[in-house]
C-alpha cells in the first residue's frame, strides 16, 4: 500500500472523508488533500492539506502539476458533477490516475456508491442485460432495510458548520471560490425556515392533492402516473438530463401528457423531500398545466407516502431519480428521460414518452433481481455520511473498496464522457434541433 497515494477533493459536509483517510493511512497508504474553502478544512481537521485559492480557469493546470509532483495514484471525490470534480475526473483519466467517485447509494437506504470514473452516463456499470446477468452470477440477494439511524438535525448542523465560515470569511480567504449549490446558503436557509412555518398547510394540501389525483368521485381508484421531482440544482439534472433544466423537462412532460395520455388518466408530481421550497413548484406546475389545457388532470403534492403512490400508479416518469429503482422493485413501469444507471432494455421503457402513457411496459423481474445483485457487488457498500454508526461502517467499507487491487468494473466497460446527447432530447424539445 505504500505505493498508493490518494488525493482527496471535496467530500460531504461531515467528517466522512477524514475517517476514510484515517483507514487508508492505517493500511499504509499515503493521503493528500486539496481544500477549496474553509468548510472543507473544518471537516478535514486535524489533518493538514493544500489549499487551492485560484480561479476556476487555473484549476486544470494546478491539478495536473499537483498530481505529477506528488505522484498521485488515486483521486477520491464526492460525485463528479461539481465543476472542480468534473475537471478532476477528466484530468485523472487522461493521466492514468484511478478516479473514485463516492456518493449516496443508488440503493436506499444506508448504502453508499463507490465507482470508477463517474456516475450515471459516466458510470462503467453495463447496460447490456447479458453483461449484467454475468456480473450477478453467484452474488447473493441484496440485503434490504435500514441499518442506521438518521437525523435531519445532525445533517442541518453539519451543513451550517460547513457554510457559515464560508459566508463570513470566504471573501477574505478564498475570494474566487463559489459554492457548488444552486443558490447562496443564506437564501437556501430562508427557504427552509419558511417551509417549516408552512409545514401544517403543506401537509394538508398534499393530502388533498393525493386524494384528488388517486381517487374518483365515487371513491374508486383513479388511473394516474407519478413524477417524483428531483432537486433543480442536482447535478444528476444539470449534467445528466436533456437541457439540464428540470422546469423545462416538467413542462415538456406536461405537454406530452396533454397530447398523448388517455382520457381520464392523471399526472401527479411529488416534491422532493428535501426541496427547500424556493422552486415554487405548485405555482409553476399549475400554471403550465392550465396553459396546456390539462389543469384538472395534473396535481402536485409536497408530501405523502412515495412507496404507496408508486404501487398505486400506472407508471413512474422520472429523469434519473433513484425512485425509479424503487418503482422497478415494486414491478411498476418506469421511463427515465435522462441518463440513469437502471435505464436498461427489459427494465425501463425504451419507447417514446408519447407511447408510455398508453402502453407502459412492466419490468422483467428476473433481470431486475440480477441488476440489483450486480449493482450491489460492484458499486455499493453499506454506510452513510451522517450518524456515528453509519460513518464508522461507511468509512471502513469505502476504504476497503478503495484499497482493492482489482477493479470490480474493469476499464473495458468505460464509456465515453457524456456529450450532452440524450435519447429523449428531440421528443421533449423538438424546437432545439437535437
Image (cartoon, helix red, strand yellow):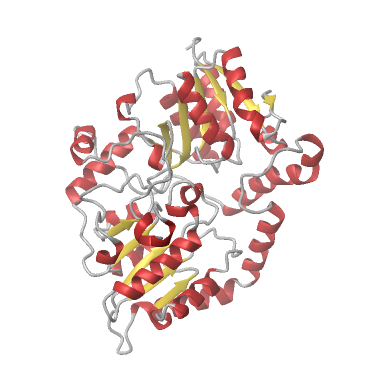
Which quadrant of the figure has residue 195? bottom right
Q: Where is residue 216 shown, x and y percent of the image?
A: 32, 85
Residue 315: % across, % down: 29, 65
Check the image and report above or below for 411 versus 179.
above
Left or right side of 223 for 200 = right
Q: From the viewer's side, name the closer residue of 52 and 165.
A: 52
Kindly give the residue lying farthest to the right in the view shown. Answer: 172
* Left or right, residue 382 beside residue 331: right
- The spot of residue 142 in percent (x, y) is 29, 42
214 lies left or right of 275: left
Residue 61's quadrant in the figure?
top right
* Residue 272 at least partly seen: no
* Number of marks in picture: 0
Q: Is residue 18 visible?
A: yes
Q: Nearer the viewer, residue 299 or 14?
A: 299
Q: Residue at x 19, y 37 (%)?
A: 133
Image vertical order of residue 409 relative to residue 214, above or below = above
State the residue lying farthest toward the bottom. 218
Side (left or right) of 316 relative to 80: left
Query: Residue lying furthest top in this view?
Result: 2
Q: At 54% from the left edge and 32% from the top edge, which residue is drawn?
A: 87
Q: Residue at x 26, y 47 (%)?
A: 344
Q: Position of residue 211 (x, y in %)?
A: 39, 79
Q: Residue at x 22, y 42 (%)?
A: 370
Amino acid at each position: 500500500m505504500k505505493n498508493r497515494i490518494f488525493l482527496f477533493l471535496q467530500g460531504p459536509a461531515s467528517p466522512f472523508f477524514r475517517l476514510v483517510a484515517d483507514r487508508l493511512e492505517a493500511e499504509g497508504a499515503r493521503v493528500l488533500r486539496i481544500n477549496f474553502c474553509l468548510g472543507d478544512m473544518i471537516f478535514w481537521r486535524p489533518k493538514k492539506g493544500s489549499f487551492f485559492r485560484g480561479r476556476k480557469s487555473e484549476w486544470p493546470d494546478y491539478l495536473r502539476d499537483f498530481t505529477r509532483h506528488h505522484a498521485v495514484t488515486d483521486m477520491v471525490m464526492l460525485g463528479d458533477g461539481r465543476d472542480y470534480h468534473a475537471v478532476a475526473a477528466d484530468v485523472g483519466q487522461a493521466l492514468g490516475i484511478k478516479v473514485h467517485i463516492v456518493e449516496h447509494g443508488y440503493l436506499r437506504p444506508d448504502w453508499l456508491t463507490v465507482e470508477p470514473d463517474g456516475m450515471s452516463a459516466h458510470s462503467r456499470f453495463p447496460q447490456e442485460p447479458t453483461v449484467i446477468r454475468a456480473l450477478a452470477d453467484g452474488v447473493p440477494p441484496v440485503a434490504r432495510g435500514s441499518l442506521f439511524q438518521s437525523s435531519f438535525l445532525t445533517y442541518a448542523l453539519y451543513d451550517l458548520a460547513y457554510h457559515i465560515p464560508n459566508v463570513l470569511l470566504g471573501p477574505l480567504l478564498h475570494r474566487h471560490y463559489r459554492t457548488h449549490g444552486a443558490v447562496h446558503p443564506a437564501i437556501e436557509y430562508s427557504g427552509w425556515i419558511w417551509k417549516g412555518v408552512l409545514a401544517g398547510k403543506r401537509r394538508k394540501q398534499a393530502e388533498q392533492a393525493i386524494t384528488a389525483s388517486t381517487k374518483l368521485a365515487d371513491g374508486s381508484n383513479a388511473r394516474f402516473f407519478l413524477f417524483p421531482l428531483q432537486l433543480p440544482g442536482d447535478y444528476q439534472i444539470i449534467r445528466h438530463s436533456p437541457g439540464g433544466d428540470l422546469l423545462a423537462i416538467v413542462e415538456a412532460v406536461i405537454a406530452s401528457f396533454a397530447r398523448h395520455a388517455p382520457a381520464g388518466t392523471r399526472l401527479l408530481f411529488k416534491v422532493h423531500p428535501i426541496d427547500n421550497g424556493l422552486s415554487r413548484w405548485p405555482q409553476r406546475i399549475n400554471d403550465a398545466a392550465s396553459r396546456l389545457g390539462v389543469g384538472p388532470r395534473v396535481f402536485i403534492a409536497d408530501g405523502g407516502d412515495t412507496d404507496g403512490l408508486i404501487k398505486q400508479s400506472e407508471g413512474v416518469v422520472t429523469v434519473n431519480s433513484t425512485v425509479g429503482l424503487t418503482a422497478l422493485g415494486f414491478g411498476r413501469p418506469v421511463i427515465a428521460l435522462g441518463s440513469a444507471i437502471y435505464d436498461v432494455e427489459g427494465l425501463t421503457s425504451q419507447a417514446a414518452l408519447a407511447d408510455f402513457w398508453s402502453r407502459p411496459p412492466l419490468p422483467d423481474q428476473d433481470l431486475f433481481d440480477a441488476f440489483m445483485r450486480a449493482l450491489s457487488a460492484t458499486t455499493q457498500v453499506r454506510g452513510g455520511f451522517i450518524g456515528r454508526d453509519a460513518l464508522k461502517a461507511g468509512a471502513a467499507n469505502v476504504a476497503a473498496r478503495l484499497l482493492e487491487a482489482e477493479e470490480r468494473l474493469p476499464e473495458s466497460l468505460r464509456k465515453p464522457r457524456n456529450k450532452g446527447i440524450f435519447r429523449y432530447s428531440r421528443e421533449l424539445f423538438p424546437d432545439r434541433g437535437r
